[in-house]
Image: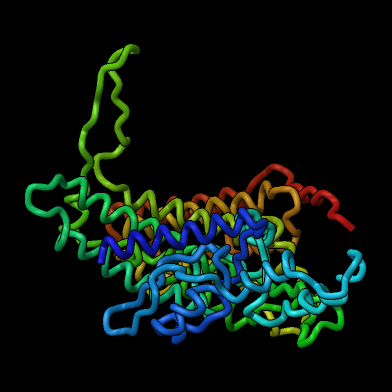
């Protein structure tokens, strides 16, 4: 099975690269064409693949034990690939000039609204600074309900990570084999745990032309219920202590082999800074990646202005973003859980308190004034809840942590410097 898997993977890579040879760009909306049931059907995936295009960056199509299993990798050209090649290369009868080809080409191009033939490339997948807005256009996802798929993958990956010690290393192997076996699914876990951030404040983009069959408006909102579902996933799989709690029997085996050598330049030794895998630091980096996207000036602007395009309650507001994040990161202040918070949770709380302080006292260019005002209100809430928490029974470390959060909130709220209005963003293209 391992050999066949490797052959199938190489086959999928070759299909993708040959697509580039024919002039095809990446198509990161191709994963949205199929349902979970279709991807679990070997007959379906053998005929149509695991995405509508080989130009998608599709992950391994793997499902939990007891679930039907389709092809693991893209085995064939997808419907979009035949469609794109037909547009670029097919012979059009009775056309003697480029202009004569236009009616036939326009009929092909008018099919964007059919999920099998949609196209969205790299330009629509840059989420990190708030540019991308359509959560359907992302890499390494599957199915037409990616949030459900991501939750399935995250639960499965957590089980795999906690069971590494049951299979690795084999007798006679180095413990670095266990480290490798843990690192790969951990990278996947980080990727899937941060993906729901793309849904927050999102809008669906249609590239159909006016008058195309079944076309929708160019911009449509992601529903508030979907945005809240996405936030709850971030809360569960990214910001909770339990999300990053792995078996000590696994973590204590993840060491690397020391390697050094002599060259003409002398002794070469370049080890990893840590002998173990720094799960706490990995969690911090993943959390900051999501928060940097959610609180980027462009994202804040877009959420603040959704009310100008859509009816109240249709989509989320800036108040939702700040309130959901406070509940997700500082919620244990309300229920007394702060006494049980672990290092991952404490670190997230400290970093978010500092982020709120910066949003209030020195916001980045383009930050809406509404976001600045809401950051101040959240700091007020933090000051109040931390003061209340200090009346409870806390161990020394937790008390020090809560007092530090209280101090950050107070210092920001009592800042003597003039609070500057954030500089306006550069003008967009008109």
Q: Residue at x 32, y 84 (%)?
A: 67
Of 409 and 108, which appears nearest the observer? 108
The number of callouts visible is: 0
Task: Please state which of residues 270 and 294 is positioned toward the viewer in this rendering.
Answer: 270
Depicted 132 relative to depicted 266: above or below:
below
Q: Which quarter shows the C terminus? A: bottom right
**Is residue 333 left or right of 256 when viewed as pictured?**
right
Q: Is residue 340 above or below residue 173?
A: below
Q: Position of residue 126 (x, y in %)?
A: 63, 57
Counting from the top left corner in percent of width and height, residue 64 is at 31, 78
Relative to residue 270, is residue 232 drawn left or right? right
Say which quarter of the image contains residue 157: bottom left
- Which residue is rendered at x = 92% and y = 67% of the image? 99
Of the 4 image quadrants, the one containing the N terminus is bottom left
Q: Nearer the viewer, residue 325 or 188?
A: 188
Instruction: Please identify the residue farthest to the left as the structure is shown.
Output: 171
Does the rendering let one see residue 323?
no
Say if 51 sits above or below 174 in the image: below
Q: Is residue 380 left or right of residue 388?
A: right
Q: Where in the figure is residue 290, as x and y percent of width and height?
A: 53, 59
* Residue name at image x 32 percent, y 59 percent: 342
Residue 369 appears in the picture as rendered? yes
């Amino acid at each position: 099975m391992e050999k066949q898997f490797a052959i199938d993977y190489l086959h999928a890579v070759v299909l993708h690269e040959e697509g580039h040879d024919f002039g095809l760009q990446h198509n990161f909306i191709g994963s949205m064409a199929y349902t979970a049931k279709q991807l679990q059907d070997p007959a379906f995936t053998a005929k149509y693949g695991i995405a509508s295009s080989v130009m998608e960056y599709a992950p391994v199509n793997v499902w939990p034990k007891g679930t039907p299993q389709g092809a693991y990798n893209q085995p064939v050209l997808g419907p979009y690939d035949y469609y794109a090649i037909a547009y670029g290369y097919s012979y059009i009868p009775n056309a003697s000039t480029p202009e004569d080809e236009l009616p036939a080409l326009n009929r092909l191009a008018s099919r964007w609204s059919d999920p099998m033939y949609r196209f969205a490339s790299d330009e629509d997948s840059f989420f990190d600074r708030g540019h991308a807005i359509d959560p359907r256009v992302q890499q390494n996802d599957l199915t037409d309900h990616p949030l459900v798929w991501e939750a399935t993958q995250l639960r499965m990956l957590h089980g795999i990570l906690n069971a590494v010690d049951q299979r690795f290393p084999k007798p006679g192997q180095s413990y670095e084999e266990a480290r490798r076996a843990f690192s790969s699914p951990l990278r996947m876990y980080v990727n899937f745990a941060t993906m729901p951030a793309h849904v927050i404040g999102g809008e669906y983009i249609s590239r159909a032309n006016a008058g195309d069959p079944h076309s929708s408006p160019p911009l449509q909102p992601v529903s508030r219920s979907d945005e809240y579902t996405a936030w709850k996933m971030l809360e569960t799989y990214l910001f909770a202590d339990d999300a990053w709690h792995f078996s000590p029997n696994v973590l204590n085996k993840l060491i690397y082999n020391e390697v050094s050598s002599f060259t003409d330049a002398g002794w070469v030794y370049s080890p990893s800074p840590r002998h173990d895998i720094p799960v706490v630091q990995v969690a911090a980096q993943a959390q900051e990646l999501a928060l940097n996207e959610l609180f980027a000036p462009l994202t804040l602007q877009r959420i603040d202005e959704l009310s100008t395009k859509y009816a109240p309650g249709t989509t989320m507001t800036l108040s939702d973003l700040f309130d959901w994040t406070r509940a997700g990161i500082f919620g244990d202040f309300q229920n007394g859980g702060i006494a049980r918070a672990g290092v991952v949770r404490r670190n997230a709380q400290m970093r978010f308190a500092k982020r709120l302080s910066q949003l209030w006292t020195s916001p980045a260019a383009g930050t809406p004034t509404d976001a600045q005002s809401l950051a101040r209100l959240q700091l007020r809430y933090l000051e109040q809840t931390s003061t209340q928490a200090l009346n409870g029974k806390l161990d020394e470390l937790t008390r020090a942590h809560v007092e530090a959060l209280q101090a950050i909130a107070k210092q920001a709220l009592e800042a003597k410097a003039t609070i500057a209005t954030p500089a306006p963003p550069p003008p967009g293209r008109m």
